Image (tube, helix red, strand yellow):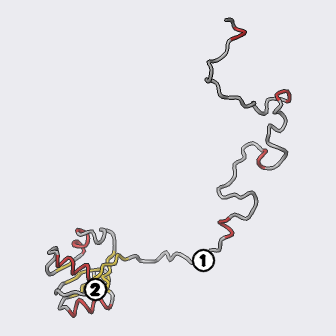
Amino acid sequence: MNLSNLQPAEGSVHNDSKRVGRGEGSGKGGTATRGHKGAKSRSGYSKKIGFEGGQMPLQRRVPKFGFKNINRVEYQGINLDSLQLLVDNGVVTDTVDFTVFVDTRLATKNSLVKILGRGELKTKLKVSAHKFTATAKAAIEAAGGEAVTL
């Protein structure tokens, strides 16, 4: 063995590809396999996300509609049957306020609560919430309770 016949171990070298752009004699000089002209042949080229080769991109072809109201107030809805369930389970007896909603995970501490009218309320309750629907308020008062707006 001498310097003229040294070679790496079998399977340790994988790079069989030709180095591009290293002179005409290498067989991959000139345009360095990038073709002639155009954005892709230039250095520093990177296509934008969603670019479809000059075709009108999907994101611009699809029609836009509607709008987002920046002043929208989002309420966490709680129905009357949920309140009745709290009474049935012995969680509340006479008053239901915001802390009860947070403790029972019906609402988060930063949310606004709106009482909705699904189901029926059989118990007299004093309910405190940020909003009430007309049917919910009527049902609470019909059961002998009180609807307090926070």
The residue that disc 1 covers is 65
x then y, percent, for residue 7: 67, 15
Kindly identify the amino acid type of the residue bearing the numbered disc 1: Phe
Occupied quadrant, residue 98: bottom left
Structural crowding at the residue carrying mark 2, measured as other residues with C-alpha within 10 Å and reported as few (<14), some (14–19) or many (≥20): some
Occupied quadrant, residue 32: top right
Query: Can you name the residue that lies furthest to the top here?
Result: 1
The residue that disc 2 covers is 119
x then y, percent, for residue 81: 26, 82
Between 10 and 47, the one lying in front of the other is 10
Q: Is residue 1 above or below residue 91?
A: above
- Of badges 1 and 2, nearer the viewer stands 2
Residue drawn at (19%, 91%) of the image: 143
Secondary structure of the residue carrying tag 1 is loop
Q: Is residue 83 above or below residue 102?
A: below
Secondary structure of the residue carrying tag 2 is loop
Residue drawn at (83%, 31%) of the image: 27
Asked if the residues shown at circle 1 and circle 2 are in contact, with their CB atoms under 8 angstroms apart, the answer is no
